[in-house]
Amino acid sequence: MTLKPLIFTIASAALAGCAHAEFASSNTQEKFTPSRTAVQIEVFKSQMPAKKYKEIGSVVVCAGGKLSSNVELLKKKAAENGGEALIGLEQPSQNCLSAAVIRYQ
């Protein structure tokens, strides 16, 4: 799955002064009920979770805010879409962050 179209859309919104996160599902047929709050979402930057997991989508945020604020937006969007953790946190451009959203099995 490529994030380029999603990043372009959000980057355009960020340049217009908006700050929000977007979720792209890995499987449009499967929906997950939120089970955690944004505060409970784990973030794995360089290591992988010890538990078995399934990638359910990806999330990206482009905003001019602080890195910690952007991570909080990623966590909020992941929680809203049934995620339990974020893996592979990356910064594809100066004002954007992206990560894969996972659920534990």
Image (cartoon, rainbow, N blue to C red):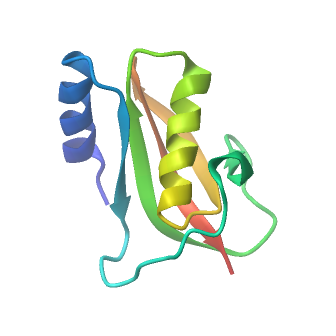
What residue lies at 57% left-to-right and 63% top-to-bottom? 83
Q: Nearer the viewer, residue 52 or 36?
A: 36
How many numbered discs, if any? 0
Pick the quarter of the image with the N terminus: bottom left
Residue 14 as seen in the image, left or right of residue 87: left
Q: Is residue 22 above or below residue 35?
A: above
Q: Is residue 81 above or below residue 72?
A: below
What residue lies at 51% left-to-right and 29% top-to-bottom? 70
Residue 22 as seen in the image, left or right of residue 103: left
Q: Residue 6: x and y, percent?
A: 25, 45
What residue lies at 19% left-to-right and 37% top-to-bottom? 9
Q: Nearer the viewer, residue 36 or 8?
A: 36
Q: Residue 46: x and y, percent?
A: 70, 41
Q: Residue 25: x and y, percent?
A: 36, 66
Query: Residue extending furthest bottom?
Result: 29
Query: Residue extending furthest right?
Result: 50
Residue 52 as seen in the image, left or right of residue 80: right
Quarter of the image holding residue 105? bottom right
Q: Nearer the viewer, residue 73 or 92?
A: 73
